[in-house]
Image (cartoon, rainbow, N blue to C red):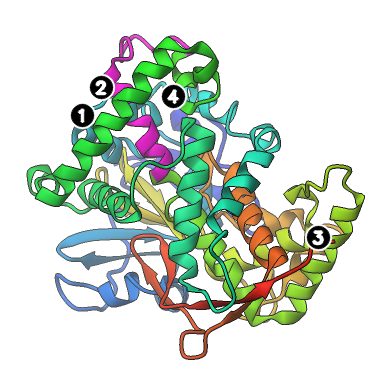
Amino acid sequence: MQTEPLAASTGLSEPKCPFSGASPGSIKVGAGNGQRPPKVKCLPFIGPIKQFTGDVIPWLEETRKQYGEAFRFPLVGNELTVLCGDDAIALLEHEELLDTYKSQEILARALKSKLPMTHSGPNHKYYRKIHTSWLNRQLERQRREEIVKTVSEHVNNWHPGHTFDPLKESQSQTVDVLSRILNGEPFPFTSKELSTMVHTVIFATYGHVPLWLALNNPVFLKVAKKMDENSMKLVRRVRQDPEFAEKTLMGQYLKVAPKDDLGEWKDEDLKIVPITAYLAGYDTVASAAAFMLYQLLSHPEWLQKVRDEYNELTREAADGSVDPMKQKVLRAIFMETTRINPPGALVIRYANQDFQFKGYTIRKGSEVIIQISSNHMNEELFPNPTKFDPTRFLEDDTSQLKRTILTFGSGAHRCTGAMVGPLFSQEMVSYWINHFDLELVPGNDKPRIVAAPFTQPMDLKVRVKGPRAVA
């Protein structure tokens, strides 16, 4: 089959890679010689499941050194193709080659709503604008008082000697903040109920099992019914109260006319908006916060720098409110934390057509995993890359380095909460460490890193030593 450069075949510009070492000309449409990426030596059928469900970055780095920037392997009977490097990240800009349509179609069937189809397909940009025009810096600024109040309510029971799991605590606080800011109500479910919903839906979407099998668990059905009933109440309130609708993510959908291929929004479609809000932050925002707390308590010199900066900003603020965008040290720690332990190191896409990557053929329909953390351990960009060193992001010009940290994805399907997600993480952690003296509990002071499917720190325990006086 004849091949041609991406620009010539699509009418679009070549992928724009953020680094000078990228070579977008290596991406071409067509099967070429048909040679597929090399297959990783691993257990048949099962594949490298232990490595892939743990701290995956060290394994990815070793595999890249051995096989190059394109390789494939089985994982519980399904073949996955992994693409790494700048060219792979550049591919995420082009939906004509890689898309999320298949996963969104499954999600739509699982949730019995056409709304997931707004996250993919020909009208994706139209609907994406709904999110990005609302989920922005201004939203965090306008609702900061409510965010801080929510976090403070959660820590009211933090007395000396109180011990907590930072991941579970951050998940609980994250979904309550998201629920209040995006849905206009305190989080109405238990953490166990939400975990059941989130992980069942993820498994149904990406688990390669029949939907009837994934979704017919009696526990899940009970939780789904409870969430449906609550969501339908929200839909009715949003439709009846324009002032309330303006303050909710669901209300933003009602402000624009649906495209012809989807028709009018029905209540059944809109009811999943609150659930997708929880799906968006339950793992990524919460995991980032938990890893941040671990790094700060493991590096007391950086903890003190964050507190000194916070005290100074508190004295300068007329109302005592500290803007997380001004907490440069804390933001550098967020970047360095998510460089070493990104909640999302990989994103899943599906090939829309045959194309060549680095001379290998990626076949239409292939499940493709892009390593968005490709440069996190790049020794040229980050000398001594395994060392925790936030000074990397405190230099005069760190814009190029910051562009390598893609915690919330990249390209056409980058998470629409990529602006507010980091701010929510920083708000939580800032409040914890500046209002309390905390310590890691010996014996539970190092995380066991698990990908389920997002990277999370497990088995950590933190103890409250006592409250702190804020300047």
Tell me the residue at 56%/67% (across/down): 158
User: Closest to the observer: 63 or 327?
Assistant: 327
- Tell whether label 2 touches label 1 (CB within 8 Å): yes
24 inside magenta stretch: no
Query: Does 304 appear above or below 323?
Result: below
- Say which label, 3 or 2, has the lower sequence index: 2
| Alpha carbon distance from label 3 to label 1 | 46 Å
- Disc 3 on helix, strand or loop? helix
Tell me the residue at 38%/26% (across/down): 118
- Disc 1 on helix, strand or loop? loop
| Alpha carbon distance from label 4 to label 1 | 17 Å
Q: Which residue is mark 3?
A: 310
- Say which label, 4 or 1, has the lower sequence index: 1
Q: Which residues are magenta?
A: 255-278
| Alpha carbon distance from label 1 to label 2 | 7 Å
Query: Does 193 appear above or below 43?
Result: above
Q: Which residue is mark 4?
A: 250
- Tell whether label 2 touches label 3 (CB within 8 Å): no
Tell me the residue at 69%/32% (across/down): 142
Q: Which mark is residue 268?
A: 2
Of labels 3 and 2, the one closer to you? 3
